[in-house]
Image: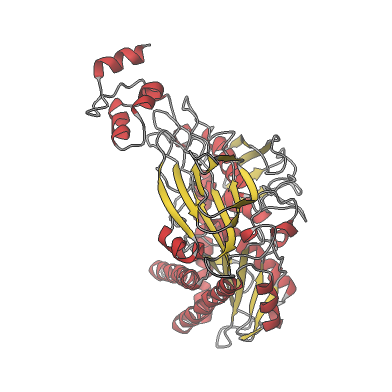
Amino acid sequence: MLDPVLCEIVKNALLMVAQEAGIRAARSAGSTFVSQSAEVACALFDATGRVIAQTEFGQMHISALRSMLVAVMEDHPPETLRDGDVVITNDPFRGGIHPTDVGAFRPIFHEGPGSHIKGPVFYCGVMMIVSDLGGMSAGGLPANATECFHEGLMIPPSKLYDAGELDTGLARMIRANSRTPGKLGADIDALAAGGNVAAVRMAELVAKYGYAHLMSIIEELLDYSERLVRLGIEQIPDGVYHGAYTVEDDGVEMDKSHEVVATVTIDGSDFRVDFTGTGVQARGPINSSHSQSLSCVLFVLRCFLDPDIPMNEGLYRPIHAHFPPGSLVNVAYPAACNLRLATGQAIIDALFRAFAQIYPNKTMAGSATVHTVNAHGKQMGSDRIYSMLDIIMGACGGRPGSDGVDGIPFIFFASGGYDRNVEAYEWQNPVRYHRYQLLPDSAGPGEFRGGSGTIKEIEFLTEAQLTIRATDRCRIKPQGVAGGQVGRGGDWILNRGRPDEVVLPAKKTNHRIKPGDILTYTVPGGGGFGDPLARAPGRVARDVRSGLVTVGEADRAYGVVIDPATGAVDKAATQARRSK
C-alpha cells in the first residue's frame, strides 16, 4: 500500500505545478483582462489524456482542456510529437468553448528508467481568453452573431512551436487576423510559457520520485478521488429529480426565450443527468458547447460533495451526462456560442432547482449573470488600434441562513478572480472610470436577501465602437425562492441624465460612440430567499446603514421603518407596518 502522506505531498506538488504554470501564463499575457485577473486555466494530463491535476481557478475552462486534448491527440498522434512542441486550438466543436478562448498543449517527455511510452508521458494544457482574434466586433464577442465565423479565427489543432521553433507563418497569420496583434502575440506566447514551466517542474518530480513510482501515486490519487465522489453521491437519496431555467433571449430573436431542462438521477454511487427537453440551439450566440456544459454540471455536483476532493480524472468517472446534440447545451457546427454563459448559468440554476427537491436547506435563489463591455477604436494621438474587454459580474442569490454575497462574481466561476484593477484599464486604453460600486436596492428582498449588484461608469476619450452584452436576466430577473423576491435586472444607459441620453438594449453590437460619451451600466442582483417580512429588522437596518438598501425600500419590501436621521429601527412603527 502506498504511503498516504507521500500521496498527499505529491497531490499538492502536482497542483502547484498547474498553479505555477497558470500564474506564469497570466503574468505574461498581453491582454489587460487576463493579466489583471489571473483567470487562466491550466491542467496536467498523463500520456492517455487523463486529468491528473488542475488549477483551482479557471473552472469554466477545465472540461474544455480535457476535451480539446482529445482533438489534439487525434490530429497530432503522440508518436509524432517532439520535445518543445506546442499545439494550439480553439475549435468549440472539437472540445473548445468559443474562438476567443484559446488552448495550448505542451507535451512533456521522459526517456529514463520506468518509461516505455513512445511519445509524451505528460501533457500540460493552458487556456485563456485572448485579446482579439477578429470577428464582427472587438474580442470576437458580437452579441448578434449567428455563426462561428462572426466570432473570430477558428484554429484547428496546429503546431505553433515545432521542437521549440516558432512556426512564424502560423504566428503571422494569427496576428494578421487581430485588431491588436501585439497583445494577441503576447497572449499566445504566454500560453506557451505556462506549458514550459510545467515541463520543467514535471521533470523535477520525475527525477525526485522516478517515473514508475510517480505514476503509481497518480493512479492512487485518481482512484482516491473516485472513491470520495462515489461516497458523496451515495449520501444523496436515490431518485429522479427535475429542474429547469429560462434564458430570456439569444441576442438575435429578442422576444423569444429558451428553456434549459435537466433530469437528475441518483443511482447508488452514480450521478446521471439528462438534458433532454432542452430547447434546440438558438440563432444567436447563447449556445453552449459540450465541454462548457460539462463544466457547469461538475461545478454543481461539487457543491454537494466534499470540497477537498482532488480535481482529477477520478472526479469524472461516476458522472454520466447526456447533452442532446444540436441543443442549447451541445451546440452543432457552425452555430455561434460566445454568449454561452447565459445557457451555462441556466444549467447551473436548473440543477440547483433539481437538488432543492433533495436538500431544501441547501437551495439557492437565482443568481445574476455577467455583463461584458467590448470597445475598440484608435488610441489618443495614434493610428494604433486598441481593443478592451471589461467584465463585471452579478451576485449570487440568497441561501438558507445566508444572504447572497455582495458584488462577488456569479456562481459559475466560483472565485473572485475577475475583479480587476480599473487603473490598469485607464493606463492601457483611452477610457476613464467614474464609478464602480455596489448598487442600492438591487438585491432581491428575502429573509435572506440576494447579493447586491453593481454599477459602473466608463467615459470613452476617443471615437470607438462599443459592443455590450448583458448575458441574461435583465427582462427575466434573477428569481427568488421560498417567498423571496426577484433581484433588480441590469441595464445600459449612454450619457445618463444628459440631453443625448440613450437607453441601449441588453445586447448591442458595434454601437458608435464619440469622445466624452459615458456608459453607465448596472448588473443584476441575486434573488431573495424566504419571506422578506421574516427578515430581522436589525439586519435591514444594517443594510440601510451600509448603503445597500434605502429607507424607502426597507419600508416597501421588508415592512421595516427606519429613522433616516439615526438609522435606527422604529420598533412600534415596524410592528404596525408588518401587521398590515
Q: How is the image coloured?
A: secondary structure
* In the displayed structure image, the side of residue 37 where residue 324 appears, left or right: right
* Residue 130 vertical placement versus 320 (above, below): below
Residue nearest the viewer, comparing 523 with 289: 523
> Image quarter for residue 419?
bottom left
Is residue 267 in sight in this rendering?
no
Residue nearest the viewer, comparing 49 with 528: 528
Is residue 84 in sight in this rendering?
yes
* In the displayed structure image, the side of residue 402 where residue 244 appears, left or right: right
For the C terminus, which image quadrant? top left
Tell me the residue at 60%/76% (across/down).
106
Q: Position of residue 555 (x, y in %)?
A: 36, 22
* Residue 542 vertical placement versus 426 (above, below): above
* In the displayed structure image, the side of residue 403 where residue 259 appears, left or right: right
Q: Position of residue 268 (x, y in %)?
A: 58, 44
* Residue 291 vertical placement versus 385 (above, below): above
Q: How many numbered marks are there?
A: 0
Q: Position of residue 77 (x, y in %)?
A: 72, 77
> Image quarter for residue 48?
bottom right
Residue nearest the viewer, comparing 38 with 491: 491
Q: Position of residue 328 (x, y in %)?
A: 70, 45
